[in-house]
Image (spheres, coloured by chain):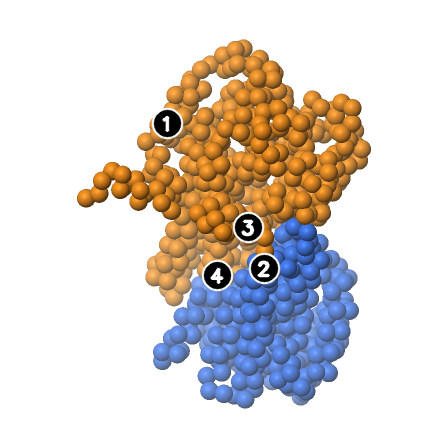
């Protein structure tokens, strides 16, 4: 993410960098420990609260709902800097932003007014969401039955991010007998929700993910019945570039740690940064990292300027940046040799986190097929 | 069309037919019984996977996360019960004498389920390779007796190899780098042995091994000319175990820190030093050291290639299972053309990886360390003679100086440098190609599986974590690429220099 393209963001950027360095960096290793996503640890909940206190959770939210309405560039810049230090926290912000976008796309103002202006804690403000799926790719969604104004949800939903933390969740479900799916707001404190233990996942360990089973849980519909796919497509169109920003941050962190290490580590009587093959690998990492920064920044500007086909740019940026990141983090571990494989350094975490970020918003190959379908059309 | 001499002239020039198509060139020389033996080995590995590795691997991995101090010594015991620690020990030294190339197939099978288990077993053979390639038959016999007894008593005796140091990884695998490196493990010659000071890191199975092959140096500035290879036993005075590393993967197999503080190693446990080298060869000590390292890695790198192939296979099998059980757009995912093409590519990667490590083992069989054991008459002789014959007739010779002289001569002096280039070069080809394939297939599987791939219970995320180490140990893949250039390309181009960047 290149802030020079938007100088207004500089003061905000300084604040984020200071937060990431001061609050997140000292605890990265601690937050990555098993049991993953166990929120008993005060240190994790404390970090959530600080993110909330600093206003990072309302970047896309209009001021009338208590947000700061700073737009996509600001959100991407925030997540790049956070992911450079610990991408788990970027997932928390991403998940919350995705929930908000679904609510906003559905023009569900009563829901927005109910939650955001009245929240006093991160637990009340953060909304859980199944960030790793495209609901239309799920064969069996929870079923919703209507009883006048309200709905009851029954069935299982896998991999709900923040499911064991937040008070609220935005979840997809299928209204019985109707085509498509709809989004619902669910109170996660409802006793009719069965929650699994935090799931043992590849990466992003500080952010809890669970499976949930609904057994006649009261739910409030978000927007119109059967319009879930439309809201998801509109929300994800803009959020793809946000996932790219997280990846770009992971890349930056990997490149920086690799450069620092190779300047210090000696083999054959000289710093390994002076080995030409090591330089070539670093160069490949830098090329990808810099290109990703530019890609994300330009895409954000394109989105804000509402250029034609901005959604295509957004998903394209995400797909290519994720691929580049998976290569970069692999090299990032490699350049540290055995040390890169150990948890004492940050590289192995980035190696895991990058793959996890790539899985956001559904299967990558299906995003490609959807993209080319849109281009051909 | 061409005269015989013309054919010979064409096929001898670079790239020479004999060096480039080993499987074809040497196929007629392979003993047929090796195939049957290898089939048996694969069957044993699959049984072990069904009964032990598959049911336990995820649970054990989780346990290592719950308690980072935990590794799985009980699994070392389990492997001992299955007889894995003597399977590939020659009958001459009291083992079961299975052919060495079959170890790679075994590694692939286990690695396709759990690389941690594969490492627990294969690293023992890395230790044995280091021990054997020193050529000291007396010490080999002594240590192998302990391994055999360990199997009989149920108290496993496994062997580690300690070469990597905190400030020297790549350096200690190449003599061209060794003398410029920051090597710290010092051996001081004293009456009756050596005093060792220093430490070794990332030693697989360090905490669970009874014996360790240790490398130290009498002159840290001239390490390549002053290397001392010796055996150290757990509990020796001055030899202590430090922590074991908190790794990303392969967590049931510890990577240990070994510390040596005024540790006295008697001469009777010293296998190779400059003085012993001069007893069987006039070649430079430095060159013999490189040959020794090259022979070890030409055995172990194809095995790591088999690990990589196994990882690629594990990822492929998980993706295949997912695609066959998941529906997409109302029909099974496996019936989508784009899915089939990706699965086909993953499958091809597995087959290509296997070809690479098999070719490297073919080199070892006919041009390298296994050549004596795999000659047809010798193979059948060793296979069919009763164990008592080895124990009573041949074994006593192993304690005599002539035994050590002969083995040292055979491995470290008589073998042709050109043959060794082929073996070590192909070992490196297999190592970096197969391990890159392993990580690549994991990546492809994760892309195909999405959020399901992220979940530990679906196995691919563990394989991805485990597989990354393969690109690092046994020489980083970058060092292995340089070794391929040095061994297989540079000899044909006299102006080419390696490690002179």
Whether tag 2 and tag 3 are in contact, CB under 8 A, the answer is no
Nearer mark to the viewer, of 3 and 1? 3
Secondary structure type for disc 2: helix
Q: Which residue is mark 1?
A: B31
Number of numbered discs overlaid on the protein picture: 4
Whether tag 1 and tag 4 are in contact, CB under 8 A, the answer is no
Q: Colour of chain B?
A: orange
Q: Quadrant of residue B296?
A: top right
- Can you say which quadrant of the picture contains the N terminus of chain B? top left
- Can you say which quadrant of the picture contains the C terminus of chain B? bottom right
The numbered disc on residue A276 is 2
Give how far apart the Cα atoms at labels 1 and 2 are: 45 Å
Q: Quadrant of residue A215?
A: bottom right
Give how far apart the Cα atoms at labels 3 and 1 are: 38 Å
Q: Which residue is mark 4?
A: B447
Give how far apart the Cα atoms at labels 4 and 3 are: 38 Å
Q: Is residue A132 above or below residue B246?
A: below
Is tag 4's residue or tag 3's residue first in the polypeptide sequence?
4
Whether tag 1 and tag 2 are in contact, CB under 8 A, the answer is no
Give how far apart the Cα atoms at labels 1 and 4 are: 43 Å
Q: Which residue is mark 3?
A: B498
Give how far apart the Cα atoms at labels 2 and 4 are: 32 Å
| Left/right of residue A351 with respect to residue B486 in the rendered view | right
Chain letter, disc 1 residue = B
Secondary structure type for disc 4: helix
Q: Colour of chain A?
A: blue
């Amino acid at each position: 993410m290149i802030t020079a393209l938007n100088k207004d963001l500089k003061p905000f950027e300084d604040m984020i960098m200071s937060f990431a360095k001061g609050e997140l960096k000292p605890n990265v290793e601690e937050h990555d420990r098993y049991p993953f996503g166990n929120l008993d640890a005060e240190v994790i909940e404390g970090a959530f609260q600080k993110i909330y206190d600093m206003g990072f959770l309302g970047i896309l939210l209009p001021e009338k709902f208590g947000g700061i309405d700073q737009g996509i560039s600001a959100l991407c810049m925030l997540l790049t800097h956070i992911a450079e230090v610990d991408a788990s926290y970027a997932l928390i912000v991403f998940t919350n932003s995705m929930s908000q976008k679904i609510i906003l796309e559905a023009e569900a103002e009563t829901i927005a007014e109910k939650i955001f202006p009245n929240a006093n804690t991160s637990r009340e403000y953060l909304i859980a969401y199944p960030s790793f799926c495209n609901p239309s790719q799920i064969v069996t969604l929870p079923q919703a039955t209507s009883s006048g104004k309200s709905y009851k949800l029954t069935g299982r939903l896998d991999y709900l991010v923040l499911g064991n933390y937040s008070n609220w969740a935005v979840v997809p479900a299928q209204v019985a007998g109707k085509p498509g799916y709809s989004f619902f707001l669910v109170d996660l404190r409802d006793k009719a929700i069965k929650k699994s233990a935090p799931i043992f996942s590849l990466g992003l360990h500080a952010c809890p993910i669970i499976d949930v089973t609904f057994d006649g849980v009261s739910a409030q519909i978000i927007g119109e019945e059967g319009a879930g796919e439309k809201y998801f497509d509109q929300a994800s169109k803009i959020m793809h570039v946000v996932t790219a920003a997280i990846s770009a941050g992971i890349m930056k962190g990997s490149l920086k740690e690799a450069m620092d290490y190779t300047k210090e580590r000696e083999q054959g009587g000289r710093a390994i940064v002076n080995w030409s093959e090591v330089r070539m690998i670093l160069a490949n990492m830098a090329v990808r990292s810099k290109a990703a920064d530019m890609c994300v920044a330009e895409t954000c500007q394109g989105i804000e300027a509402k250029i034609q086909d901005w959604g295509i740019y957004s998903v394209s940026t995400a797909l290519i940046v994720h691929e580049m990141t998976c290569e970069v983090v692999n090299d990032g571990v490699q350049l540290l040799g055995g040390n890169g494989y150990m948890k004492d350094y940050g590289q192995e975490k980035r190696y895991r986190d990058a793959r996890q970020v790539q899985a956001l918003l559904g299967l990558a190959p299906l995003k490609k097929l959807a993209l080319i379908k849109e281009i051909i059309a | 069309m061409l005269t015989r001499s013309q054919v010979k002239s064409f096929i001898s020039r670079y790239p020479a037919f004999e060096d480039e198509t080993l499987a074809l060139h040497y196929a007629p020389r392979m003993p047929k019984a090796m195939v049957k033996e290898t089939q048996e080995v694969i069957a044993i590995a699959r049984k072990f996977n069904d009964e032990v590795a598959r049911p336990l691997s995820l649970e054990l991995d989780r346990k290592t996360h719950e308690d980072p101090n935990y590794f799985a010594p009980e699994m070392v015991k389990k492997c001992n019960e299955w007889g894995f620690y003597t399977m590939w020990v020659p009958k001459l030294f009291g083992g079961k004498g299975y052919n060495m190339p079959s170890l790679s197939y075994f590694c692939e099978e286990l690695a396709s389920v759990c690389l941690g288990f594969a490492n627990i077993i294969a690293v023992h053979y890395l230790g044995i390779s280091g021990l054997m390639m020193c050529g000291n038959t007396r010490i080999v016999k002594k240590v192998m007796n302990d391994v055999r007894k360990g199997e009989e008593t149920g108290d496993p005796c496994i062997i580690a190899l300690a070469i990597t140091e905190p400030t020297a990884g790549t350096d200690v695998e190449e003599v061209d780098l060794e003398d410029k490196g920051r090597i710290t493990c010092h051996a001081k010659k004293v009456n009756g042995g050596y005093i060792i000071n220093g430490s070794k890191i990332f030693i697989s199975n360090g905490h669970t091994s009874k014996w360790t092959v240790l490398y130290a140096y009498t002159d840290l500035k001239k390490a390549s000319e002053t290397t001392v290879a010796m055996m150290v036993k757990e509990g020796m005075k001055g030899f202590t175990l430090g922590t074991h590393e908190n790794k990303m993967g392969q967590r049931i197999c510890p990577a240990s820190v070994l510390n040596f503080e005024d540790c006295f190693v008697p001469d009777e446990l010293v296998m190779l030093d400059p003085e012993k080298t001069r007893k069987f060869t006039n070649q430079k000590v430095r060159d013999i050291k490189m040959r020794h390292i090259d022979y070890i890695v030409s055995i172990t790198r194809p095995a790591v290639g088999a690990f990589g192939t196994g990882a690629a296979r594990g990822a492929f099998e998980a993706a295949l299972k997912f695609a066959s059980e998941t529906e997409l757009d109302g029909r099974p995912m496996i019936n989508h053309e784009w899915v089939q093409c990706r699965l086909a590519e993953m499958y091809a990667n597995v087959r290509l990886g296997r070809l690479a490590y098999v070719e490297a083992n073919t080199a070892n069989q006919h041009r390298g360390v296994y050549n004596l054991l795999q000659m047809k008459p010798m193979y059948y002789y060793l296979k069919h003679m009763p164990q008592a014959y080895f124990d009573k007739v041949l074994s006593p010779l192993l304690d005599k100086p002539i035994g050590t002289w002969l083995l040292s001569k055979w491995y470290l002096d008589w073998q042709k440098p050109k043959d060794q280039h082929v073996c070590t070069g192909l070992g490196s080809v297999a190592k970096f190609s197969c391990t890159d394939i392993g990580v690549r297939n994991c990546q492809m599987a994760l892309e195909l599986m999405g959020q399901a791939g992220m979940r530990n219970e679906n196995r691919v995320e563990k394989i991805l974590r485990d597989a990354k180490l393969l690109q690092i140990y046994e020489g980083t893949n970058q060092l292995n690429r340089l070794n391929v250039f040095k061994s297989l390309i540079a000899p044909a181009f006299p102006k080419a220099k390696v490690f002179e960047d």
